[in-house]
Image: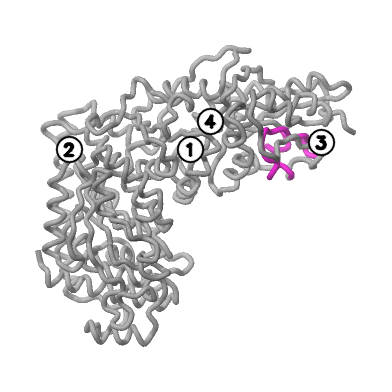
Amino acid sequence: MNTKALEKVALSVRSLSMDAIQKANSGHPGLPLGAAELGAILYGELLRHDPSDPAWVDRDRFVLSAGHGSMFLYSLLHMSGYPITLDDIKSFRQIGSPCAGHPEYGAAPGIETTTGPLGQGMATAVGMAIAEAYLAAHFNTPSHQIINHYTYTLVGDGCLQEGVSAEASSLAGHLKLGKLIAFYDSNKITIDGSTDLSFTEDVAKRYEAYGWQVLKGSMYNFDEIADLVAKAKAETSKPSLIILTSIIGKGAPNKQGSHSVHGAPLGADEIAAARAALGIPSEFYVAPEAQEYFAQKRQEWKKARSEWQSLFDAWSLANPEKRAEWDAFFAATPGTFTDPAFALGEKIATRTASNKVLVEAARAIKNLVGGSADLQSPNAVAIPEAGVFGPVQRNGRYIHFGIREFGMAAISNGIQLHGGLRAFCATFLVFADYLRPALRLSALMKQPVIYVLTHDSIYIGEDGPTHQPIEHLASLRAIPNVRVLRPADAEETSLAWKMAIERTDGPTVLALTRQNVPVFSKADPDWRETIKTGAYIVKKPAGKADVVIIATGSEVPMALAAAEKVQGKQVQVVSMISRELFEQQPAEIKNAIVPKGVRTVVVEAGSRMGWEAWAKGADILSVDRFGESGPGDKVAEHLGFTVEALVGILNRV
């Protein structure tokens, strides 16, 4: 190990970070200055990667969970050979720069995930480690270990205070994810000041209780860090937390160790003092020794990746069936499955229908993996043929996430980001509130995680207002790039799953009923295609429509019943499985389904928010207050959410 060169790499991280942040007049210099030595040895000696092939499947993953310290990552990606230029670094935090305020997935190769919301990076890393363990169990043979990499993450005090990291870390310990290694930048400083203000727990004991191996050392001793990582790798049945004592903003002589260096530029005077103290000759300085070191390393990395490719080719020849499955796992085009059959008039909850579809989908799409937050039966997401992923059995595709909704969703992001697997997760719709920040990152990163959210309205009944979702559909629709699908019967549920699986550019929410709903006939003979626009005509009148009822989910049968009771009006009924998808369609498609100029009435068992664009307030039958405890139909009647109420609206002139 060339420690002299690593020192120059660390020096260059400090130089680039403080100058980029100063030029932008915005940023967090504390972490990159304080953890520069870890960055140097991590990217120079520890990570198995190849910047010339950033998508190499068997590369190690690194997640900067403490994403505010983004210049740490950008500096190291630049020096080690990823396509981030010095000009990119000089445009840190500017519009269009790959060096954004926090690491953003897709902005540049080498950024494995979007981080910034603290703690989610730790959970995402857990998901990546799960994916590695599953793929290794599924594809490796005694002769060929084609999946054999580690997941590293760097966390700070803020990450470990956020609850999502506790959820994910607890599960990681239970699952014995021995190839997950977390570095804890223990500098005892947050934005407000010393961690003594609010965070005095014994983190080491907490992680030992989770089932982790806990190791301790200095952020500034290369040999010690290398030894600690070796010990972490030697412990194959526990994830490892390596606590590295550090000084925030190290190298800034008047500000290091202080909260003032956490989240603001150093200032011109302090940068001048730091350059003088560290021996940095100029702005945006990269030491020649660091450049030479990484130039040599790039050749070594390329050779290691080439050796892996030879191993992979030999495995492919020896295991043609596995190779065919590998190609399917990593294909850009999602798999397909056969719809289960449902009979016209059959009454079945859409969550139950969803399970029948899920079983068929998992049978055909072998890389579909996921689970629920301790709600396998209520969410109806059991996949008996898939097996359970656990501490010993790694080849199962069902994951018991436990009662950890936020952790579950963030872990699912990690599984999806890793590559090779298609992730889903499940809970009650009302508990979308617990997982919303991770769903938002799914959308921001354009990750096609499927969210199965059941018990979608007041009709869940006796569990009462705490469990009856009201505002949740509206709030989920408000998140950009989230597609909410609320199927109205079992047949629509099959199509909803297909639409979710076929989507590759963002997450899909399946909002499903607890109560039984009938399978109804569809007026549109091509409804299976038309539904992909977000809506289709369920009931078409004999003549020109006087009024159009837009309904979603379990309210479509309600709309059909109301249409039959209205006298003297030509009523058209539209099932709008996805309002946001339908709103994206060209005007001619929208007008063909919801004719322009025709009175429109909307019915949905939830908040009216957003429906005002489709109907006048008096023409919207919705639920805009919390529910009540009682049988679902009695609750609906109590709230005035009935067929008769809808008929009354339709009859109103």
Whether tag 1 and tag 2 are in contact, CB under 8 A, the answer is no
Q: How many marks?
A: 4
Above or below, comparing residue 334 to residue 557 in the picture: below
**Upstream in sequence: badge 3 or badge 1:** 1
Mark 1: amino acid: Arg
Which label number is shown at residue 313?
2
> Disc 3 and disc 4: Cα gap in Å?
33 Å
Give the position of the N terminus as an image quadrant.
bottom left
> Disc 1 and disc 2: Cα gap in Å?
31 Å
Mark 3: amino acid: Val
Above or below, comparing residue 294 to residue 522 in the picture: below
Whether tag 3 and tag 4 are in contact, CB under 8 A, the answer is no
Q: Point out residue 352 in the picture as x, y percentages from the top left corner.
A: 51, 21
> Which residue position is annotated with label 4?
454
Q: Residues within 10 Å of mark 4 (few under 14, many from 20)?
A: many
Relative depth, front residue between 635 and 248: 635
Give the position of the C terminus as an image quadrant.
top right
Residue found at x 32% / y 48%: 125
> Disc 2 and disc 4: Cα gap in Å?
44 Å
Q: Point out residue 636 in the picture as x, y percentages from the top left corner.
A: 70, 27
Would you say residue 201 sits in the magenta stretch? no
> Disc 2 and disc 3: Cα gap in Å?
63 Å
> Which residue position is annotated with label 3?
598
**Upstream in sequence: badge 3 or badge 4:** 4
Residue found at x 81% / y 28%: 545
Which label number is shown at residue 503?
1
> Disc 4 and disc 1: Cα gap in Å?
20 Å
Q: Point out residue 312 in the picture as x, y percentages from the top left corner.
A: 18, 39
Mark 2: amino acid: Asp
> Disc 3 and disc 1: Cα gap in Å?
32 Å
Residue found at x 40% / y 56%: 118
In the rendered structure, which segment of residues is drawn in magenta? 588-612
